[in-house]
Image (spheres, rainbow, N blue to C red):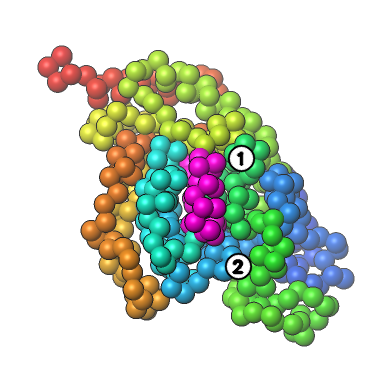
Amino acid sequence: MAGTELFGAEERKEINDVMETGVLFRYGHDAQRNNHWKAKDFESEVKKITGAKFAHAMSSGSTAIATALAASGIGAGDEVIVPPFTFIASVEAVLFIGAIPVFAEIDETLCLSAEGIEKAITKNTKGVCLVHMCGGNAEMDSIMAVIKKHNLILVEDAGQAFASSYKGTYTGLFGKAGSYSFDFFKIATAGEGGVLVTNDEETYKKADVYSDHGHSHVGAKRGMEEHPYLGFNYRISELHAAIGLAQTRRVPGIKEKNQHNKKFMQKLLSTNKHIGFAKVGDESGDSATFLNLLLPDKDTTQRVVNEFNNAGVMGFDYWFLNMYHFINQWDHLKNLQTVSNLPAQILERSQNYNTMQLPQTQEVVGRLISFSVKVAWTEEQMKELATNIISCVEKATKPVNA
Ligand SMILES: Cc1ncc(COP(=O)(O)O)c(C=O)c1O
């Protein structure tokens, strides 16, 4: 994945700035820090790319999405529509702010569909946690029409889709608030980190306070600041922010290279009639971190996965069997196995997680294989990979008696 492929002098320079002053904390210590404000600069860089009015760096994408939900006014007992194909953090975030996840269908964009959202609405629905999967973006025009029609709060988990845009608007900025992850596996990494974005000043101020034990961040003496709300510690350190800053500066170049490499691979793979691709709401805004193959059906796809394993093809994910990304493996969620009670366990729930049916999602994820797109791929490497992929698909689709 791009961020970790490119790591060098720029990252070391930003980290060294912090090491020289020893100010690892993002707030205050003005005299000591030699004018180095890595979290603030990281936020500015994210705003520059996305056009967000406000950005707030935090300890992870998980804490950023939980904060985005809470700062948007979603809390105990509220139903929030979520996708069954995501990273489980999106669902955990809903649960841990006291709300109740309700699962809805995705479509071939790999994201919740407008129809899926509309069908899952109940009298208790307060919001939607839309997840932009695999570097792409959802079909936002139809989704926004449903959000507006039913007066829902939209929060976007763009954990995997930093720098992805739909018709000129960046993921995370369609609703009240959105979040990006900068963990080790993303287009840019901070080691660990996340950034919340919003165009709404009030939501930003709430997020700022909530993610730092209620501190208002007004005034020079930290211990004497006002505390308008209760909060918790979701702060990012200056060291992590320094890496995130250097990495984020690389993102426009990474996106351009990713898009080129993804298109190059798609052109080569299109010569096989069995290989199709996941849709992107707006392909021109794709961050292109993943090349998402859609094969004819689940059985064929599983045979292709076996052929990949036999042939030593690397760098792909078959999400249908993944423990953390797909609901089929989430027995702990379905049975709400928690270390201590959450509001969802004692409140009424309109959906039975063990009996609910999501056939369209099963069908799409069953046919999906994703390859990480590499910025460092050469044309020769891509041609070799495409040849290997096609050869495995041919073996897996050969009629049995041929
Ligand atoms: C869609 C999505 N949301 C949230 C997260 C959580 O981010 P983090 O690992 O930074 O907590 C991830 C991480 O993979 C993700 O893919």
Q: Is mark 1 within 8 Å of ligand 1?
A: no
Disc ID at residue 293: none
Disc ID at residue 71: 2
The kind of secondary structure element at disc 1 is strand
Depth check, front residue: 186 or 298: 298
Query: Mark 1 sits on what residue?
Result: 165
The kind of secondary structure element at disc 2 is helix
Depth check, front residue: 99 or 302: 99
Q: x and y percent of residue 59 in the render? A: 60, 63
Quadrant where the C terminus sits is top left
Q: x and y percent of residue 315 in the render? A: 42, 36
Which amino acid is tagged 1? Ser
Q: Are marks 2 and 1 in contact (CB under 8 Å)?
A: no
Q: Residue at x 69, y 80 (%)?
A: 228
Which amino acid is tagged 2? Ala
Q: Residue at x 42, y 29 (%)?
A: 277
Question: Where are the magenta residues, as a range?
Answer: 128-157
Q: x and y percent of residue 247 in the render? A: 67, 46
Q: Does 131 lie within the magenta span?
A: yes
* Residue 132, visible in the rendered structure: no
